[in-house]
Image (tube, rainbow, N blue to C red):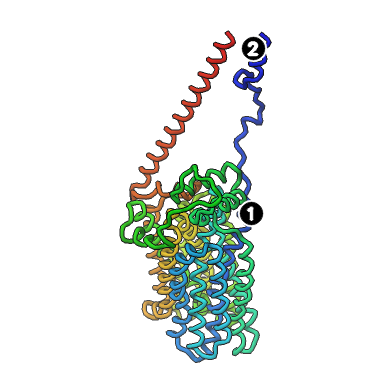
Amino acid sequence: MAGLNAEKDCNPSSQPPAEKTLADFDPPKKPKRNKFALVCAILASTTSILLGYDIGVMSGAAIYIKDQLKISDTQVEILVGMLNIYSLVGSAAAGRTSDWIGRRYTIVVAGGIFFVGALLMGFATNYAFLMVGRFVAGVGVGYGLMIAPVYTAEVSPASSRGFLTSLPDFFINAGILLGYVSNFAFSKLPAHLGWRFMLGIGAIPSFILAVIVLAMPESPRWLVLQGRLGEAKRVLDKTSNSKEEAQARLADIKVAAGIPQDCNDDVVQVVKKTHGEGVWRELLLHPTRSVRHILVCGIGIHFFQQASGVDAVVLYSPRIFEKAGITSDNGKLLATIAVGFVKTSFILVVTFLLDRVGRRSLLLSSLVGVIFSLAALGFSLTIIDHSHEKITWAVVLCITTVLTYVAFFSIGIGPVTWVYNSEIFPLRLRAQGASLGVAVNRVTSGVVSTTFISLYKGITIGGAFFLYMAIATMAWIFIFIYLPETKGRTLENMEVLFGNFTEWRSALKENKLKERQESNGVETESNTQTQLAVSSVATTVA
């Protein structure tokens, strides 16, 4: 009998269940943001400051460059807008480069190239020399634009991926604000020196960033693709909210990379197609239905982000404020600082909403505000354009709607585009897919920025913004129909959302039902095993 009692004491199934307290019924606490992942995301995202600074500083520097180098409005358009076209070279090369040398060293390459470009622009002696510097800086910008969101998405846990992946866009806007402030600060220098300091000073942060990035770990997903499982596991342990989450993330990545789950060596052999070869064929020539849907969403959202006219406002805000009646250079530069401050402030707000509200809701609500702001801006500028005297209410409306436009843009379509594009592509296609989205983004941005002056001279400045309003309306319709919500899903589980284009909602419901049934099946099996164990103990006792 004593032996039976000892057996009962050693068998956990025979122990009476512990009494539950009120704390046991509390909802599970939301995990805190992983600080290491946050630091990595911030360091990677600071590369985006380079693009923002160049956009912001050129809007003011162009005023002085035009007078100093005696160039025409057409040359100003080319100078301002061609950076976006040049960045195509960088974004196209960045996908292959990042698959070859890794995400981290690609960020270093981006900073190094921009460093050279900024110095060339600062020391330019004529328009042709300036355009050479612009080309080199554009290549660096293209590298940074593509790689920063990809690295951040790959290193972030699913619970905070939206917040962390929105950081590159926050830093773009911080860079724009710094560019505006630089314009105002250096405008006090002699004309032949002011614009050179505005452009050349960008070399300093690019060098510092390239050095700091070396302290970051490599992307765990890239490490797995190289067969370096031991290093990937150590990075995942640091960037996940728990050991269990790190193990689950590693298991998902191994599945995506085609590595068996029982393969747990620190270094394993991975069958590699290439460093990017064959991926373009799968992405463009023979895509599956789900990849085709992903491609449409990724390219479409990048096109509409830029086609809604944000670069026309950000790059040419001094000209817009001049149309509104602000004639002094100081007044125009101070007004652009207000634009940069509003844009950056609202980006900071939305970073905390992405993982709570979701991508889709922010995109749709943001575009509603963008549409109404563009309509009001077009209306006020039309009134001002057709009036022979200053109309105060129209001037106030014009300035106000410029600010509301950048505010609404910054709470949705601005940052969410980068987040969405960086997370929807499958692992095997992510680098090239993201670079394709960036390429479309830069081409569209280049077209908008190199044609704005000619456009408003052709259809009036009010008509230009009415055109952007029509495009923003089409963007709302496109997003409502085609883009599913991605909040809370792991990167490896994203592909199930796509493939049905306009019928993705029904596919999502079916997937949720299947997951619920599988969960219920596991729970039923667990309950059955528990009942069998209890029956076995009862029989033994009897």
Q: Which amino acid does label 2 sit on?
A: Leu
- Image location of residue 227, percent across then percent down: 50, 53
Of badges 1 and 2, the one in the foreground is 2
Q: Relative to residue 292, is residue 194 drawn left or right?
A: right
Q: Position of residue 419 (x, y in %)?
A: 49, 57
The quadrant where residue 277 appears: bottom left
Q: Is mark 2 on a helix, strand or loop?
A: helix
- Residue 4 - label: 2
Q: Residue 197 carries which label?
A: none
Q: Do the residues labelled 1 and 2 touch (CB within 8 Å)?
A: no
Q: Which residue is painted at 44% across and 29% down in the image?
A: 521
Say which residue appears at 65% left-offset and 84% top-offset. 188
Residue type at mark 1 is Phe
The secondary structure type at the circle numbered 1 is helix
Q: Nearer the viewer, residue 471 or 260?
A: 260
Judging depth in this view, the residue of 204 and 82 nearest the camera is: 204
Question: In this rendering, is residue 13 above or below 452?
Answer: above
Cα gap from disc 1 to disc 2, whole angstroms: 52 Å
Q: Residues within 10 Å of mark 1 (few under 14, many from 20)?
A: some
Q: Is residue 357 above or below residue 202?
A: above
Q: Choose the circle earlier in sequence order: 1 or 2.
A: 2
Q: Dot 2: within a 10 Å radius of its alpha carbon, few (fewer than 14), some, or many (20 or more) residues?
A: few
- x, y percentage for residue 273? 40, 58
Asked if residue 515 is positioned above or below residue 292 in the image, the reply reads above
Residue ID at (64%, 62%): 215
Which residue has dot 1 on it?
A: 36
